Amino acid sequence: MIRVFTADNRALAWHIKNILQSNSIEAEVRNDTLHSAQGGIPLNECNPEVWVVREADEQQALQLIDENSGIDLESAPPPWKCGSCGEQNLGQFDICWNCQAAYN
């Protein structure tokens, strides 16, 4: 098994899995229930991941993800550090997940 995608939310992870499976690539979603553990474990370890079962399917899976995800991974905003509590946040968020302070 090999990880091919890390999502920001469960819905996107399942969407990617469905795309892969509709193209005969066996895949599974992992970590899709870890969002409730955020704060107890690092944020980047709580994100849902899509894994393909056969490593030989990796390149086709990556191509399908690139074509169908609707996300330009190259232009994602960089992570930012909260000025109030010092917590690291993903770039697409406008408020801190820890203290709800607005991004400046």
Image (spheres, helix red, strand yellow):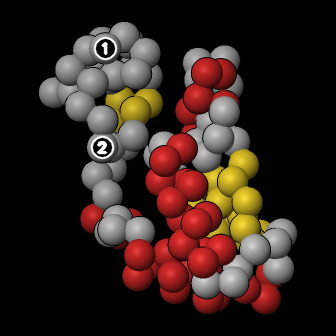
Taking the image as shown, residue 45 lies to the left or right of residue 91, namely right
| Quadrant position of residue 94 | top left
Q: Is residue 20 above or below residue 9?
A: below
Q: Look at 72% across and 49% down and name the residue there.
A: 30
Report helix, strand or loop for mark 2: loop
Residue at image location 16% in from the left, 27% down from the top? 104
**Mark 2 nearby-residue class (10 Å; few <14, some 14–19, many ≥20):** few
Using the image, tell me which numbered label, if any, was put on residue 36: none
Residue that extends furthest to the front in the rendered view of this protein: 22
Given the image, on which type of amino acid does mark 2 rest?
Answer: Gln
Q: Splitting the image into 4 quarters, where does residue 39 fall?
A: top right
List the single residue furthest toward the left. Answer: 104
Q: Residue 72: where, in percent of width, then height? A: 32, 69
The answer to which quarter of the image holds residue 51 is bottom right
Q: Earlier in the sequence, mark 1 or mark 2?
A: 2
Of 85 and 22, the residue lying toward us: 22
Q: Is residue 58 visible?
A: no
Foreground residue among 81 and 16: 16
At label 1, the amino acid type is: Gln
Structural distance between the alpha carbons of marks 1 and 2: 14 Å
Q: Say which residue label 2 marks.
A: 92
Image coords of residue 102 (percent x, y): 20, 20
Which label sits on residue 100? 1
- Find numbered disc 1 in the image and state the secondary structure of the residue it sits on: loop
What percent of the width, then of the height, locates residue 21?
65, 74
Asked if residue 21 can be seen in this view, the reply is yes
